[in-house]
Image: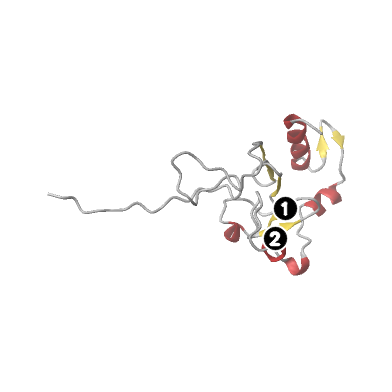
Amino acid sequence: MGTTHDYFRFAQMLANGGELDGVRNLGPRTVELMRSNHLPDGGELRDVALPGAYGEVGFDGMGFGVAVAVAIDQVRTQVIRSPGELMWGGAASTIFWVDPVEDLVCNFMTQPAGVRHLQLPGAAEDDHLPGDRRLSRPEPTITPEQP
């Protein structure tokens, strides 16, 4: 068991290539293995996910490294992210990600247990966060002005 701060420090250590506060916790090769896709034939999580399954990190365009999901195809993820970005989600819609290109660490902690996605007030039925970190809104309806 750990705290949000502990989890953030873990993510920061990954962003630092395995070091935190001047102490090496993971070797460079271990971090590189974490950031590399190990699914057969360079596949993505979608290829091995159960039908109808849901995950906070999404499945399309995401590979799997050592203990974390890895971005392998930005177009397929439909999210602006860098190649090699690693992340993982938890059972109650928590998620962390580390973007090595942008030098960015995020630790998103929520606890709506049993909820497949967060429903924002006034959002369209198909809106969801944090699973794919994007919102989809219905196209606006344009009607001609009435005289």
Please state which amino acid type lies under the numbered disc 2.
Answer: Leu
Q: Residue at x 71, y 44 (%)?
A: 91
Residue 139 screen position, x and y as percent: 38, 54
Label 1 environment density (alpha carbons within 10 Å; few <14, some 14–19, many ≥20): many
Residue 82 screen position, x and y as percent: 64, 51
Which numbered disc, 1 or 2, marks the residue that appears first in the sequence?
2
Q: Residue furthest bottom?
A: 41
**Residue 91 showing in the rendered view:** yes
Label 2 environment density (alpha carbons within 10 Å; few <14, some 14–19, many ≥20): many
**Residue for badge 1:** 69
**Residue for badge 2:** 45
Depth check: 60 or 86 in front?
Answer: 60
Please state which amino acid type lies under the numbered disc 1.
Answer: Ala
Depth check: 52 or 39 in front?
Answer: 52
Residue 138 screen position, x and y as percent: 41, 52
Classify mark 1: helix, strand or loop: strand
Left or right: residue 130 compared with residue 50: left
Left or right: residue 11 compared with residue 74: right
Quadrant of residue 20 within the rendered picture: top right
Quadrant of residue 76 within the rendered picture: bottom right
Q: Residue at x 71, y 54 (%)?
A: 70
Residue 100, compared with residue 7, is above or below; it is below
Q: Residue at x 66, y 36 (%)?
A: 111
| Protein image colouring | secondary structure
